[in-house]
């Protein structure tokens, strides 16, 4: 939004708009005081694995979670609280009216962080004519670690490879 001339196409995967109706964010909201008073939160192996099982067990590949744990835990078992604070106290962070480039929203069927209705509200407010919404079956919030992650790469590749609009044709 701040420098639209630097963005050709935008993919929003596992995106959160207002958080309205999200059971996960309602639960996180109970810890708002903690997020406001602490700079970090624990992100240990259990938390990393819960990303794959929180919304719909059986949708994510345990090997992908194990690989994430193996790669991230040597770097530490805590992360800044900022993203959680933003999700429970500062949404929305993105104004759909200010996006000037083509947009693809990718949502897993079982994503517990952003409801379909909330994302469709965002989608409906986009003013760019080149916009797409992809609901991907069998995936939860962790769309890139799910068993059906090949669907993510398919729709993203298709979107990114879309030919530019002829400048002589009015939009």
Image (cartoon, rainbow, N blue to C red):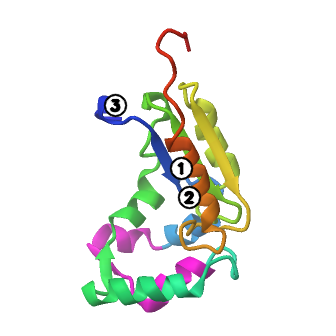
Above or below: residue 57 compared with residue 125: below
Q: Is residue 32 magenta?
A: yes
Judging depth in this view, the residue of 147 and 157 nearest the camera is: 157
Q: CB under 8 Å between callouts 1 and 3?
A: no
Residue located at (60% from left, 55% from top): 154
Task: State left or right for residue 88 relative to residue 26.
Answer: left
Tag shown at residue 72: none
Residue located at (64% from left, 33% from top): 124
Task: State left or right for residue 82 relative to residue 120.
Answer: left
Q: CB under 8 Å between callouts 1 and 2?
A: yes
Residue position marked by numbered label 2 in the rendering: 153
Q: Position of residue 63 (x, y in %)?
A: 54, 87
Q: Secondary structure at mark 2?
A: helix
The part of the chain drawn in magenta is 31-53
Query: Mark 3 or 2, which is nearer the eye?
Result: 2
Tag shown at residue 157: 1
Which class describes the residues within 10 Å of circle 3: few (<14), some (14-19), or many (20+)?
Answer: few
């Amino acid at each position: 939004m701040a420098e639209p001339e630097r963005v050709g196409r935008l993919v929003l995967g596992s995106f959160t708009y207002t958080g309205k109706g999200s059971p996960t964010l309602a639960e996180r909201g109970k810890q708002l005081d903690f997020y406001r008073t602490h700079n970090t939160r624990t992100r240990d192996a259990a938390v990393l694995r819960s990303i794959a099982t929180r919304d719909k067990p059986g949708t994510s590949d345990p090997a992908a979670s194990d690989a994430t744990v193996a790669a991230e835990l040597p770097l530490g078992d805590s992360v800044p609280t900022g993203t959680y604070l933003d999700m429970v106290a500062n949404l929305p962070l993105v104004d759909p009216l200010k996006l000037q480039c083509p947009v693809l929203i990718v949502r897993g069927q079982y994503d517990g962080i952003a409801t379909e209705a909330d994302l469709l509200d965002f989608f409906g407010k986009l003013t760019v004519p080149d916009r797409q919404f992809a609901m991907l079956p069998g995936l939860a919030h962790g769309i890139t670690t799910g068993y059906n992650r090949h669907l993510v790469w398919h729709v993203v590749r298709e979107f990114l490879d879309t030919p530019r609009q002829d400048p002589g044709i009015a939009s």
